[in-house]
Amino acid sequence: MKLQLNGASIDAQVTTLAELLVAEGFGGAKVATAVNGTFVPALARADQILNAGDAIEVLAPMQGG
Amino acid sequence: MHDFYGTTLANGFMLGTAQYPSPAILANAFKRSGASVATVSLRRESGQDRAGQDFWQLIKDLGVHILPNTAGCHSVKEAVTTAHMAREVFDTKWIKLEVIGEEDTLQPDVFGLVEAARILSEDGFQVFPYTTEDLVVADRLLHAGCEVLMPWGAPIGSGLGLNNIFGLRAMRAHFPDVPLVIDAGLGLPSQATAAIEMGFDAVLLNTAVAKAGDPAAMAEAFATAIKAGQLARAADPMEPRDMAAPSTPVIGKAFLV
């Protein structure tokens, strides 16, 4: 199904957010996630069902002032 | 003196981690600064290069307190969501809350700031709000649950120093027991000294160090300046006066006219 991952269109054959993270190379990474603008805690990713058109944000530590 | 939500910091130096020429220079700047807090952010990660993971290791190795920010957020919802994501990634209740209201000055949207501060405080966050020197806004932030205030010295990245000395001095006098941090706008160590001499508990800066020709040397200069300000404050400075007062004794002066 078509998804938006960090602003880019992707085609992913996954059911949950947890599966998407593994499929897209984020396995084991220190990241935080949101779906359609709503924070999804790490413990809830396996239960977060994705639907076509969902916008997923995967954020990681970065330089800041 | 340096107590922030029950955490006592070794000094009043909070240093940002952005805009350094290289990770090695960033690490060296922190080493020479002795800063007790590092500000960090969250940005989109790539599953291919996973750049954020290397940065996170570098930050952990600094051995300082981590203060994540909500930089770039322009709405309450955006800031609150970012704060929740930061709390999970950085495993801290601390959040440097920024709700930006205007692009040219990066002035905080103080209305959104108060609302976001209330939501996050009720959710257990320990909020460090990036605000102005406005006393009414400051009072609202305290009522919203903030126990620290961070007024700007000048617009972020401007290096202009302390734009409103009167306003900042009034803020310090009005809230004598609230930890106050000058956040943003400092360009020179002397400005940090002035802030600490005025009674501010800490300064938070980034660009002045990161964009210096020698960031590590500038970091040490700021550390020394902050120390000077603390010593001067503790030494109880003299009161200024309008008229001259001779320092050399007048009594006993020869009559040579």
Image (tube, coloured by chain):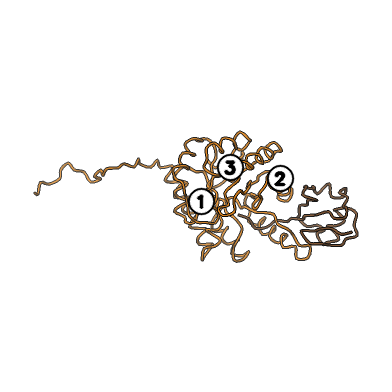
Of the two numbered discs 3 and 1 on the same chain, state the one appearing first in sequence.
Answer: 3
Badge number at residue B77:
2
Q: Rounded to the nearest whole Å, what is the CA distance between mark 3 and mark 2?
A: 31 Å
Residue B202 vertical placement versus B28 (above, below): above
Q: Which residue is label 1 attached to? A: B154
Residue B68 can be seen in this image:
no
Q: Can you give x and y, in whole percent of width and height, for residue A59 in the image?
A: 74, 55
Q: Label 2: few (<14), some or many (≥20) within 10 Å?
A: some
Label 3–label 1 contact, CB within 8 A: no
Badge number at residue B130:
none
Q: Rounded to the nearest whole Å, what is the CA distance between mark 3 and mark 1?
A: 26 Å
Q: Which residue occupies 61% across, 38% down?
A: B146
Would you identify the image quadrant in which residue B51 lies? Answer: bottom right
Of the two numbered discs 2 and 1 on the same chain, state the one appearing first in sequence.
Answer: 2
Label 3–label 2 contact, CB within 8 A: no
Q: Chain of mark 1?
A: B
Q: Label 3: few (<14), some or many (≥20) within 10 Å?
A: few
Foreground of the two, B92 or B174? B174
Q: Which residue is label 3 attached to? A: B8
Q: Look at label 1 and name its amino acid.
A: Ala
Tell which chain the image draws in brown: A
What colour denotes chain B?
orange
Residue A3 can be seen in this image:
yes
